[in-house]
């Protein structure tokens, strides 16, 4: 055991593209040590950076000498909002490998909005939120986000992964990911492991959470309140239906995303657009095209 471990790899994004699921799956494999918390956001967030390098290294202090250590911070690919991540990672993790998970950018945007709604960072109709919160679009501009990482570390150190491919062929994609990380074992994707999805999360409420987490209140609630009534009350704090974009709004988003997807497709050696995205990325595992 050693207290001087650094991560061998980082899942750097993108937000709302199954990075938490991948983190949980890797943590379940022998020979992996995944950080807890899953998203330390150490190199990106000022309040986390202020905790110091010893705090960060402490996240991996329990790892065995031959374990592969990893963390998953989607904040590392949130340009232009958090620009410090890449230069800091380059300084302290120069030999690390990186996994970048992508998803149809409009689907990602909708899940991002639901997440923001649950955290009370966003409100109102989704189409209005797109106008008020540039991050909904920016974090789904994958070529823009990942190009600086490839320029700094090289194509061989950054693995492109797609949510749709991972969902359709989880075992094969998981084996590809583990091979990229240099894992010597035989990885097994576990379908029984699931991370919370945004649609099931309750909207934040400090008062409610304080009551819910009180041990006495929990005992009384579970003892005297029927499950059906508890579920009905809980539903009042959840988004009833997944937000739907109008055809006009979706077309407008496609015009925003398609130029970036064209750049991403050129990087991968295959044409990409909003219209062709899902079919293309499901069909086969994509790698960076060699220059």
Image: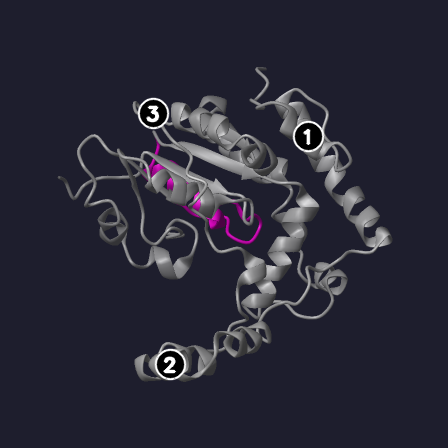
Q: Earlier in the sequence, mark 3 or mark 1?
A: 3
Check disc 1 and report the residue beneath it.
263
Question: Which stretch appears magenta?
Answer: 72-94
The residue lying furthest to the left in this view is: 1
Check disc 3 and report the residue beneath it.
186
Of the residues tagged 3 and 1, which is closer to the observer? 3
SS for tag 2?
helix
SS for tag 1?
helix
Q: Can you say whether 251 is above or below 196 in the image? A: above
Q: Which mark is residue 37?
A: none
Q: Is residue 185 visible?
A: yes
Q: Residue at x 33, y 26 (%)?
A: 183
Question: Does 80 lie within the magenta span?
Answer: yes
Q: Residue 216, located in which quarter of the rendered image?
A: bottom left
Q: Residue 62, located in which quarter of the rendered image?
A: top left
Figure quadrant of the N terminus: top left
Q: Earlier in the sequence, mark 2 or mark 3?
A: 3
Q: Nearer the viewer, residue 49 or 66?
A: 66
Estimate the x, y position of residue 175 in percent, counting from the top left. 43, 26
Q: Nearer the viewer, residue 264 or 165?
A: 165
Check disc 2 and report the residue beneath it.
223
Q: Earlier in the sequence, mark 1 or mark 2?
A: 2
Of the residues tagged 2 and 3, which is closer to the observer? 2
Q: Nearer the viewer, residue 47 or 220?
A: 220
């Amino acid at each position: 055991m050693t207290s001087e471990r650094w991560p061998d790899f980082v899942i750097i994004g993108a937000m709302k593209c199954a990075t938490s699921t991948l983190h949980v799956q890797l943590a379940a494999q022998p020979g992996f040590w995944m950080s807890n918390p899953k998203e330390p956001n150490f190199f990106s967030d000022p309040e986390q950076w202020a905790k110091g390098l010893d705090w960060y290294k402490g996240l991996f202090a329990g790892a065995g000498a031959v374990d592969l250590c990893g963390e998953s911070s989607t904040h590392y690919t949130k340009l232009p909002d958090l620009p410090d991540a890449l230069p800091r990672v380059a300084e302290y993790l120069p030999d690390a490998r990186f996994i970048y998970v992508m998803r149809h950018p409009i689907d990602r945007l909708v899940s991002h909005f639901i997440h923001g709604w649950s955290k009370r960072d966003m409100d109102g109709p989704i189409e209005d939120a797109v106008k008020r919160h540039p991050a909904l679009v920016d974090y789904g501009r994958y070529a823009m986000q990942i190009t600086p990482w490839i320029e700094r570390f090289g194509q061989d150190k950054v693995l492109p992964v797609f949510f749709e491919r991972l969902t359709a062929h989880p075992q094969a994609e998981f084996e590809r990911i583990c091979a990229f990380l240099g894992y010597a074992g035989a990885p097994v994707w576990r379908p029984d492991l699931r991370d919370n999805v945004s649609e099931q999360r309750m909207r934040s409420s400090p008062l409610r959470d304080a009551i819910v987490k009180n041990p006495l209140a929990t005992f009384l609630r579970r003892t005297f309140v029927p499950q059906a009534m508890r579920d009905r009350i809980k539903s009042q704090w959840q988004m009833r239906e997944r937000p739907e974009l109008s055809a006009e709004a979706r077309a407008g988003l496609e015009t925003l995303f398609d130029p970036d997807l064209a750049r991403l497709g050129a990087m991968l050696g295959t044409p990409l657009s909003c219209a062709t995205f899902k079919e293309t990325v499901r069909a086969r595992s994509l790698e960076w095209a060699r220059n």
